[in-house]
Image (cartoon, helix red, strand yellow):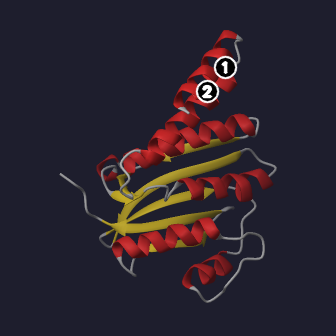
Amino acid sequence: VYNTLDSINWMALCKNEEDISSMTVSLASIMRYSIKNPEDMVELTEEIACVKCYASIQAIRYGDNFDVFYELDPDLMRVKIPKFAIQPLVENAILHGTEKTRDRGRITLSSLIRNGIVEIIVGDNGAGADTEELNKYLSGEKTALADSDGFGIKNVNERLKMNFGEMYGLRYRRNADCGISAILSVPLEIEK
């Protein structure tokens, strides 16, 4: 598969199709990330590299109508999280958030420590969503979502709880101005 993607990349470069080349290289990076080290846990820095590849593909696909800003604490980049815990949240921010706004889309990834717990936040300036419904779905109080199957967020939440315990997981909040934020909470355990 990598050789095929490499061939596509070279064909695109020969024809000056830079977008196709960029998408192919990013897709190959995501594939390598997905099969490298079958263990489920990765450092935040690795997950962010994957998210950047994913966002670059989507920026080309959607006509570059959104920006992604990375405001991550460098001291937290070695925190361990489950692989593919952030990418589905960025995907939702694009599909359900920035895609449905008239303004230029803005997605911000940030991290901080609150009460000894690391919070990784994926916020957008999109049309918003019912955060109460999302949180009830994640807690099991609600069995389905009105606008989505919710499989991605349910999976992320369950993997966080399975790896770290019930006090960790995923929750949503409405932003002060517009849009919503998905908040991952994980323990502050940084490998030396």
Q: Secondary structure at mark 2?
A: helix
Residue ranking furthest to the left: 192
Q: Residue at x 66, y 70 (%)?
A: 150
Q: Quadrant of residue 166?
A: bottom left
How dense is the environment of label 2, judged by Cα within 10 Å: few (below 14), some, or many (20 and up)? some
Dot 1: within a 10 Å radius of its alpha carbon, few (fewer than 14), some, or many (20 or more) residues? few
What percent of the width, then of the height, locates residue 148? 74, 69
Q: Which residue is mark 2?
A: 22
Instruction: Identify the residue at horizontal 17%, vertical 51% (top origin).
Output: 192
Q: Are marks 1 and 2 in contact (CB under 8 Å)?
A: yes
Closer to us: 148 or 181: 148
Cα–Cα gap, marks 1 and 2: 6 Å
Measured from the top left, where is residue 32 in percent x and y? Answer: 46, 39
106 or 21, nearer to the observer: 21
**Label 2 sits on what residue type?**
Ser
Q: Can the viewer see residue 2?
A: yes
Picture disc at residue 18: 1
Figure check: 7 above or below 172 = above
Q: Residue at x 58, y 68 (%)?
A: 153
Quick one: which residue is furthest to the right in this view? 102
